[in-house]
Image: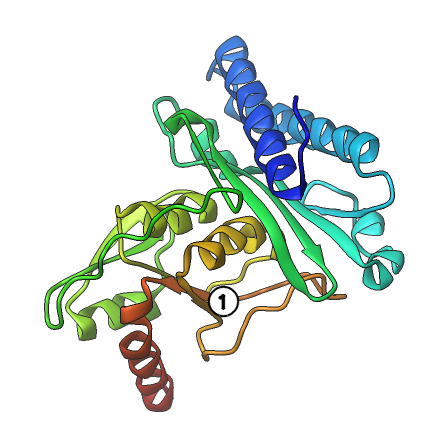
Amino acid sequence: MTIRDDHSLAGDLATEAGERLLELRARHGFDDQRALKDAGDRSSHRFLMDALERLRPSDSVLSEEATREERMDPRRLTASRVWIVDPLDGTREYSEPGRSDWAVHVALWQEGALMAGAVALPAQGRTLTTAEPPVLPKAPAAGEPFRIAVSRTRPPEFVRELAARLGAELVPIGSAGAKISAVLTGQVEAYVHAGGQYEWDSAAPVAVALAAGAHVSRIDGSPPAYNQADPSLPDILVSLPDLAPTMLACIRDLHRQSP
């Protein structure tokens, strides 16, 4: 592994973790999906933690697969550099044959902002990074339909209502990283989520989205905050920039009309 800077490190780690997950998936098979999920989470977490401890020993780490005590370690809140990782985003999709909408997230938060990040999409054979941000596709012309990524298993009614008002098509996709990546690669034009998430679900793809020039906000239009004492981050909007004002206005209207 060649280490150049934090951007390249994020990409290198996410890519290698993803390659290891592909090898584990092929070796383990799909007969016991629960065991495959657990093995994927555990092995990818251990690889990333060991690598960051070796390569960035002074930095803190917030990982989905850490223990609650590790996540709540107060030293993280006073650290100037914190890696926020999701070793396997989309365990359900990872454990199902033929699915490619799962990811590995590696992001660096530094002194109040996301500074570097990478989203590996191993089964799609690519990694999106802040080292070389993707070029955003063009937004549809005003009045033309567009696509919104939603959960393939539990799309919220709020997003259904939003899509109906906007004349948008809902596209089911697995992991949060795969959904945000789909905005950046032209599979969809937006991703809206309001059903509860955590910082590790979005930190890396948000870092890449911001570097690419996409719109990123909470659904009330405020910027998402990372490395908080409570790592929950319940909602997010990622879209092509031209669509954001209309989507945020429609979201506000829906909230005003809700009982």
Residue 5 placement, left or right of 185: right
Q: Identify the residue at image location x=38%, y=53%.
A: 154
x and y percent of residue 155 in the render? 34, 57
153 lies above or below 144 = above
x and y percent of residue 171 in the render? 25, 50
Q: Which residue is mark 1?
A: 235
Q: How is the image coloured?
A: rainbow
Residue 3 placement, left or right of 93: right
Foreground residue, 160 or 244? 244
x and y percent of residue 197 in the render? 55, 58
Residue 128 seen by the camera: yes
Tag 1: Cα neighbours inside 10 Å, few (<14), some, or many (≥20)? some
> Helix, strand, or loop for circle 1?
loop
135 lies above or below 49 = below
75 lies above or below 129 = below
* Amino acid type of the residue that numbered disc 1 sits on in the rendered structure: Asp
Residue 152 seen by the camera: no
Q: Which residue, as the protein is rendered here, is positioned at the far top?
A: 27
Residue 147 placement, left or right of 15: left
Q: Identify the residue at image location x=79%, y=44%.
A: 67
Q: Identify the residue at image location x=22%, y=57%.
A: 138
x and y percent of residue 146 in the render? 18, 60
